[in-house]
Image (cartoon, rainbow, N blue to C red):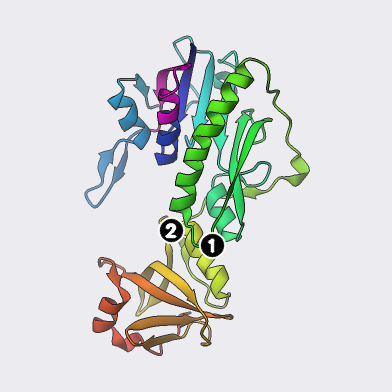
Amino acid sequence: MVRLVFFGTHEFAATILGGLLDNPLFEVCLVITQPDRPAGRKQELQPSPVKLLAQKYNIPIEQPAKLTAYSLQLKANIGIVAQYGLLIPKHILDFFPLGIINVHTSLLPKYRGASPIQSALINGETETGVTIMKMDQGLDTGPIILQKKASIESDETYFHIDKKLAELGILALNEALPRYISGELIPVPQDNAQATICKEFTRDEGKINWHKTALQIYNQYRGLTPWPGVWTTWNEKRIKIISMKIIARNLPPGQVEIFKNQLFVGTTKDAIEVTTIQIEGKTAATTTAFILGNSSIHGYVFG
């Protein structure tokens, strides 16, 4: 049995950890996840999805704030990383005889960095996948062990792709690890000339530019929903658009039209129909409910 240490934090990582726990070839002897974070209106500390799963299986857990001065005090053959969120220094990479393997949510070398799923959706990609790679000290620059592709449907958002790639990641990892450990799969260096880097998105980057096409705005919505979300402003308040769709309709960019309890906003090509909306400081509402109390928005032009 291969002893491994798992590094992960988010829901995607919890799915990958669950797949490893179901594989009798591996023993997860330690889980390393980020410290509990404040969440919700009361800002109470919440454990990560990975921590909750590890607790369920009584796996030892450690939550260092950073790994710079952290040291492992156990014996393990290999490390596995999935959406961990902290840099892993050289002394941790060198600790494992078989190195550390990362489950990355793109077809490397495209979309290295913090937001591969979001970036693929915003850019209108029709294909993505997972890459099983051996980590080095660079940013997603390590050699590739195995890749699996997945299609991106035109109506899928970050939530859909994250879930799809988590399931695909389990399959890829369970296929790759035994063959890598036995020496059958030799990691292949990436072509750095083909690499693209994606950044971490902030709330400000969710602001909609209505002078883009409806398709560009819809792709922005797909990539940035649920976080940080897409938004515009009206009466000096931020309006978050929870759900939308593209409609073949001609309106000036940013202009709002209400028609039969539907709300349309113009773009440079086609229009956006807003179906669920949330005014800053209030709960989300259907557009029909929103219009009942805010019919004066008809004719307004978003900046």
Circle nearer the N terminus (1, 2): 1
Q: Is residue 300 above or below residue 208?
A: below
Query: Dot 1 lies on which element?
Result: loop
Which quadrant holds residue 231? bottom left
The x and y percentages for residue 237 are 34, 73
Residue on which the image places disc 2 = 225
Q: Nearer the viewer, residue 1 or 139?
A: 1
Which numbered marker is on residue 176?
A: none
Q: Residue at x 48, y 16 (%)?
A: 25
Residue on which the image places disc 1 = 154
Kind of residue at disc 1: Ser
Kind of residue at disc 2: Thr
Q: Residue at x 21, y 49 (%)?
A: 42
The residue positioned farthest toward the left in the image shown: 42
Q: Residue at x 32, y 76 (%)?
A: 287
User: What is the span of residues highlighted in magenta in the rendered image?
Assistant: 18-34
Residue 71 visible here: no
Which quadrant holds residue 296? bottom left
Q: Is residue 42 above or below residue 210?
A: above
Query: Dot 2 lies on which element?
Result: loop
- Do labels 1 and 2 touch, CB within 8 Å? no
